[in-house]
Image (tube, rainbow, N blue to C red):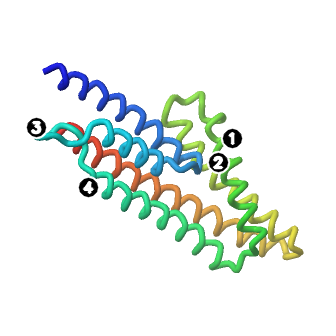
Amino acid sequence: MEYTWVYYIWAMLLLAAVLVAWATSFLTLPGNWLVLILAAVFTLVFPEDASGMGLRWSMVGILLGLAVLGEIVEFAAGAVGAARQGASRRAIALALLGAIVGSTAGVVAGLPIPLLGSAIAALLGGSVGAFVGAYAGEVWKGRTSDEGIAAGSSAFVGRLLGTVGKVVVGVVMVVVLAWDLFF
């Protein structure tokens, strides 16, 4: 009986930590991988027992597959956007740096609007940062402003779609994990 309460308290703490980890995906951080790591550590401590409480290693495997899928979605969206416009490596690298800086600035800018404001601002800030980085990279490379705008626009859309895709996969991870924890 006492084990049941301990398990549920730790399961709720895991769920809270997983939600925070998932939210870091808006900052272009590896939120889905943090969810996976937290679930794996929890499974080491609370493996599934005869009563059905605990996490199964097969669930950790499912979360691993979902985390990989999230990375593929994010990478594919960004790469397709940049490659479609023939962006240089410099533009792609600066788009990534711009996305990180823009996401961080977005979180700060979105603070006055509780919870959702920071998430949306981080998403848009990362996309704007990707645009600025790609544009700067192309112009620095000696390309025209129009080519920079084309590369920047593709980087904006790619970052936006990639991050949204990765965040959606993260939501699936959290729901699947919560289901396995409590049902």
**Which residue in the structure is indicated by mark 2?**
125
Q: Mark 2 or mark 1, which has the lower sequence index?
A: 1
Q: State the image coordinates of residue 123 (x, y, percent, origin top left).
A: 57, 49
Q: Which mark is residue 56?
A: none
Instruction: Give the CA distance from mark 2 to mark 1.
Output: 7 Å
Three-letter amino acid code at the position of disc 4: Ser
Q: State the image coordinates of residue 122 (x, y, percent, origin top left).
A: 59, 44
Q: How many marks?
A: 4
In the picture, measured across the screen, residue 166 lies left or right of residue 84, that is left
Q: What secondary structure is marked by label 1?
A: helix
Q: Mark 4 or mark 2, which has the lower sequence index?
A: 4
Three-letter amino acid code at the position of disc 3: Ser
Q: Looking at the figure, which quarter contains the N terminus? A: top left
**Foreground disc of the pair 2, 3:** 3
Q: Residues within 10 Å of mark 2 (few under 14, many from 20)?
A: many
**Which residue in the structure is indicated by mark 4?**
58
Q: State the image coordinates of residue 128 (x, y, percent, origin top left).
A: 67, 54
**Foreground disc of the pair 1, 3:** 3
Contact between labelled residues 1 and 2, with CB atoms less than 8 Å apart: yes
Instruction: Write the residue at 25% across / 43% down.
Output: 55
Q: Mark 4 or mark 1, which has the lower sequence index?
A: 4
**Which residue in the structure is indicated by mark 1?**
105
Q: What secondary structure is marked by label 4?
A: helix
**Foreground disc of the pair 4, 1:** 4
21 relative to 84, above or below: above
Q: Mark 2 or mark 3, which has the lower sequence index?
A: 3
Instruction: Give the CA distance from mark 2 to mark 3.
Output: 47 Å
Instruction: Write the residue at 48% across / 67% down.
Output: 72
**Which residue in the structure is indicated by mark 3?**
51
Instruction: Write the residue at 53% across / 50% down.
Output: 30
